Amino acid sequence: MKLYLDPGHGGQDPGAQGHGLNEKDVTLDIALKLRNILLNDYENIEVKMSRTSDTTKGLSERTSEANSWGADFFLAIHINSDSHTAQGYEDYIYNNISNSSTTAKYQSIIHAEVLKMSQLIDRGKKKANFHVLRESEMPSMLTENGFIDNTHDAALMKQSSWRQDVAQGHANGIAKAFGLKRIASTAPKPPASQKPVSPSLSPSKPADSGTGNVYEVMVGSFSSKEHAEERVAELSKLGIKAAIVSAKVSGATWYRVRVGSFASRAKADALLSNMEKSGYNDSFIVIERVKGADSSSKPAQSEGGTVYEVMVGSFSSKEHAEERVAALKKIGTNSTIVSANISGKTWYRVRVGSFPSRSKADALLTKMEKAGYDDSFIVIETGSAGDDKKGGTSGTTTSSSSSSGTTGKTAGTSGGGISGSSGSSTVGNSGTTGGNSGTGNTGSIGGGSSGGSGSGTSNNQTDIDPVHGNPSGFTILGPTILSPEHMNRFVKNINPKAPELGSYYLTFGEYYGIRGDVAFAQAILETDYFRFTGDVRPEQNNFSGLGATGSKAQGARFESPEEGVLAQLQHLYAYATTKKLPTQYPLVDPRFELVDRGSAPTWIALNGKWAVPGSDYGQSILNIYERMIHMTIQHLETTRQNLNP
């Protein structure tokens, strides 16, 4: 039996959020546990996962992959979100399928088994026109395992034991539905493809490579030692010896499961391949460099030439940088934090490699982008040789795509920040959206411009960096920075069928003086990327949940998408200010008069007002806005470099 297992959302799409949890993280953990149960406990089953880490993957990619693989069953794991009062478990099959179909029979069996294990109330077996149910060619099912914004359900989700139970419930249902046989209780032999670990290359002791590199094969990295021990036990069932080794990252201890240590990269690669074939897609190699290798913690030596440093994010908060280091460590990528002073402000960059060769840096940059880190970029440290003769000085250029950097005049990017002079410029995640200050010939996109010799600042410059600054003071009133094209491009990266509403958010945002692009992020949060997975339906043109107060209340209905956006911006205006509503457009917000005028001048102040209790509602909006900015930075920098090949 071939199971295509799809943990919902991932990467740039966090899914539903609440109580400090992201749907993408909960679904991935449940799916990984489910895969391990099925492979370890049952015969004749293959499992292919849409993702095994925090990566972005479109819906069409998932169904196309399942169809081409020839899966027998498509199972999507999701977490629900609604009105903070709704709770429980429900699941879905395609709405055009009859109740007597094979798919419906599978649904009934799996539904019953999950309920036995989940401690969730039964919300019933349902049908829907979801993409993964409609476009998959095999029987398919989508499960919604509790409500992330409900106090009771979220408390369960935070427990590893509960996630294990939910995975077990799914496994029991799949086994019953497809008649899977349990593996005999006697210890199985290692898979034919798995070579025994040589005693001289024991997992408990690194290989002695003299002065060369040591290649250690790890099968997972865990913040909990208990989870690492569970992995060791699983591997033992396959006849594979493993040892737990700890690594300290930014003060936190991570537990890696090592299955081999080699002086030869080829042997390490062979074992890594075997582990991945056994279903452990979170396997990786740690290279302990003894001499001469490039290191994330020490820039490469180029003897006065150019050094290319690969960065995975730049943050105004060192704590945020440390979180990125920890996240990279989970996927076996070593990194270090380096600081840079931009326009008098310190930024913390996360460096994963330093090379005298541009091609090597480009290769690593591409790898990090494929891993879902779209805010990666290259810093080019130029040497002094010949620079003075050209009237410049040694300096740096930062680029976010794989082409050579340039020094001197640099066009700015929205959200990128620019600070430079002849011979030194920086473009990337190191500034504030909506306005940049610096010297020399610089400019900004979306936030005004400042050019010519000397210094200048944008008229629309904001006091707070919406990407990494303190979000508590980021106001609802303010300029719209992102263009309609960039708004639409962002949401279509997750939902290709999303309506193109960016122009409305720009037009009404500018008229009312509201940050239309942040309002667009709010609509993404409210509609689940315009997929309308809650009570509100697409035909209502209600993009902000106006009047959708829970208990299946669908809320307000508007005549057109334009009117729906207008109502949302008017409602934001009511919260943001006590001023009289301008009269160019008619009042279409049915709840305008119900608002305590001026009670929420910032996005964070909407917590407990727009959404109840909504303790992290504003933060969730700004988190989406941050990802919108990062994607825009990448696109604009690629465009700039195409102009300067």
Image (cartoon, grey):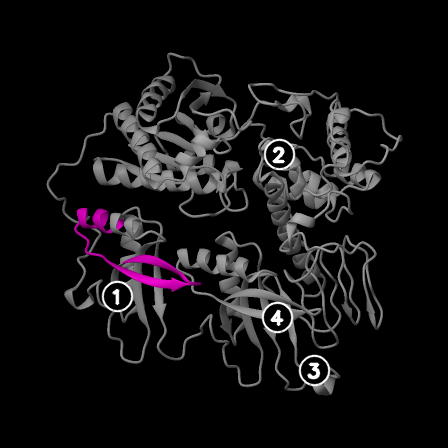
Dot 1 and dot 3 residues touching (CB under 8 Å): no
Query: Looking at the image, is 172 positioned above or below residue 52?
Result: above
Q: Residue at x 32, y 38 (%)?
A: 161
Q: Mark 2 or mark 4: which comes first in sequence?
A: 4
Query: Looking at the image, is 201 positioned above or below residue 496?
Result: below
- Can you name the residue that lies furthest to the left here? 186
Mark 2 vs mark 3: in front: 2
Where residue 261 is drawn, which disc sits there? 1
| Res 547 quadrant in image | top right
Q: Residues within 10 Å of mark 3 (few under 14, many from 20)?
A: many
Label 1 to label 3, Cα distance in Å? Answer: 46 Å
Q: Mark 4 or mark 3: which comes first in sequence?
A: 4
Q: Is residue 471 visible?
A: yes
Q: Which residue is mark 2?
A: 608
Q: Mark 1 or mark 4: which comes first in sequence?
A: 1
Q: Secondary structure at mark 4?
A: strand
Amino acid type at circle 2 is Gly
Q: Which residue is mark 3?
A: 393
Out of 619 and 244, give the one closest to the viewer.
Answer: 619
Label 2 to label 3, Cα distance in Å? Answer: 53 Å
Give the quarter of the figure containing the C terminus: bottom right
- Can you name the residue that lies furthest to the right here? 584
The residues colored magenta run 231-257
Q: Which residue is mark 4?
A: 340
Q: Secondary structure at mark 1?
A: strand
Q: Secondary structure at mark 2?
A: loop
Amino acid type at circle 4 is Ala
Indicate whether residue 501 is drawn in magenta: no
Q: Mark 2 or mark 1: which comes first in sequence?
A: 1
Out of 147 and 442, give the one closest to the viewer.
Answer: 147
Label 2 to label 4, Cα distance in Å? Answer: 38 Å
- Position in image of residue 498 (x %, y %): 63, 33
